[in-house]
Amino acid sequence: MAAIPARAGATATASGSLPRSTGRRRRNAVVVAAATGTGPAVPQEGALERPAWSGETPLSRLVGALIAFKPLYSLMKLASREVIIRTAEKSNIPWREMTKKVLESDVYEVFERIRDPNLVYPNYYLSPFHAYDEGNLSWLAAAEAEPATMSIAKRAIPEATSIEEANQIVRGNWLNAIEEHHLKYSGNCQINDILDIGCSVGVSTRYLAEKFPSAQAVGLDLSPYFLAVAAQREEKLSRQNPIRWVHANGEATGLPSDSFDLVSLAYVCHECPARAITGLVKEAFRVLRPGGTIALTDNSPKSKVLQELSPVLFTLMKSTEPFLDEYYMLDLEETMRQVGFINVCSILTDARHRTVTATVPY
Ligand SMILES: C[S@@+](CC[C@H](N)C(=O)[O-])C[C@H]1O[C@@H](n2cnc3c(N)ncnc32)[C@H](O)[C@@H]1O
């Protein structure tokens, strides 16, 4: 799998029960030496702890006030959706075609099998999200999830010549960070059981299952619509270890304690309020075996690209991502330490994303 150089970043200290990153300008901000030869650019850190458009800065408050003005919010929501779809299609992601295919399939039957009708959704999950009025609890959101996921990779590696190449780099660097961490800190403990919390339509779960083919992978999500798409796609494959799909809250999975060697949360935390992120990290700690690894990959507050995003882009993005400020304000690495994890490592795995890994002590 293709890889770009990734850089280990420092982790910050914290205070209080929900550790917050300081947001101050960092001395010695890292500009990583340019890569030699061709290939993707080396991911770079910006000068700040997190983007000036996030958290409690005047700029962030101004954007928040604009979004809170309902008529403007409705316009932004439409504009944001338009920008997302147009950008994806310009990058040769057949957004509308992929969506139509899912909506016209027999995915509705899978939904009935996979859904836990007794599941109680956390409040934050019931708000409008990503420009969908029903958030992630809708067929349109489920049908559009895979093209949206493909766009994440293309935005992170704009110089990639194809979506496949961008995906191989973004997902490859994430998987390599997990493997390296696990080998370094849990060398004798093989990865037999994997839990992918917030698996959405199963893209991350499939990457994990393919990287660790002898392991049994479980994909878990709060959206039965997303899980139905994931399960339907998987039914057509004959995998040595078929993936199991679970409709549950990642904060209270109902899965047995000490039953996984790897818990992954890929692009989940920026969609959650800080208290839910802490709940997810605690639940990961509970279900992991001693020596097990947690891996969180998501937007890096230190990413130079994200810190330098244009005002139009960050305003549109914030209009459809209600918990971004909380995500950027939370000191994720310190949260993991407070929950009990050790060997907390944070590395910029591409220009926009960090992968934070840690171990459950023996
Ligand atoms: C951006 S998607 C994840 C994408 C996927 N992991 C990947 O890498 O392709 C975020 C997912 O987190 C899920 N999610 C949010 N809060 C959750 C929770 N408390 N428990 C389980 N899933 C949750 C959402 O339903 C959504 O599917």
Image (tube, grey):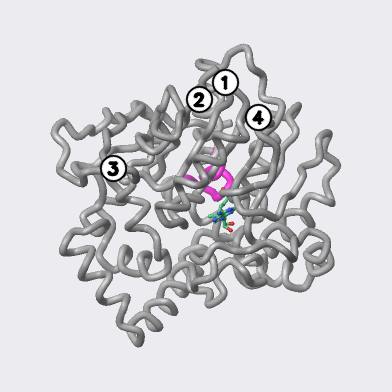
Q: Quadrant of residue 355?
A: top left
Image location (x, y in percent) of residue 128: 49, 73
Span shown in magenta? 160-168
Relative to 69, is 218 above or below? above
Neighbourhood count class around disc 1 (C-alpha, 10 Å): few under 14, some 14–19, many 20 upward: many
User: Residue tagged by mark 4?
Assistant: 258
Are there few (<14), some (14-19), or many (20+) residues within 10 Å of tag 3? Answer: few
* Spot occupied by residue 281 in the image (x, y as percentages of width and height): 50, 41
Residue denoted by label 3: 16
Q: Are marks 2 and 1 in contact (CB under 8 Å)?
A: yes
Instruction: List the residue tagged with mark 1.
Output: 291
Instruction: For marks 4 and 2, give the CA distance.
Output: 13 Å
The front one of 245 and 305 is 245
* Mark whose residue sits in front, 1 or 4: 4
Which residue is at 55% across, 22% downward?
A: 182
Quarter the C terminus occupies: top right
* Mark 3–mark 2 CB contact (< 8 Å): no
Was residue 234 drawn as part of the magenta stretch in this picture?
no
Q: What residue did someone put label 2 on? A: 359
Please state which amino acid type lies under the numbered disc 3.
Answer: Gly
Distance of label 2 from label 1 (alpha carbons): 6 Å
- Depth check, mark 3 against mark 2: the one in front is 3
Dividing the picture into quarters, in which one does residue 139 lie?
bottom right
In the depicted view, which residue is nearer to us: 113 or 105?
113
The kind of residue on which mark 1 rests is Gly
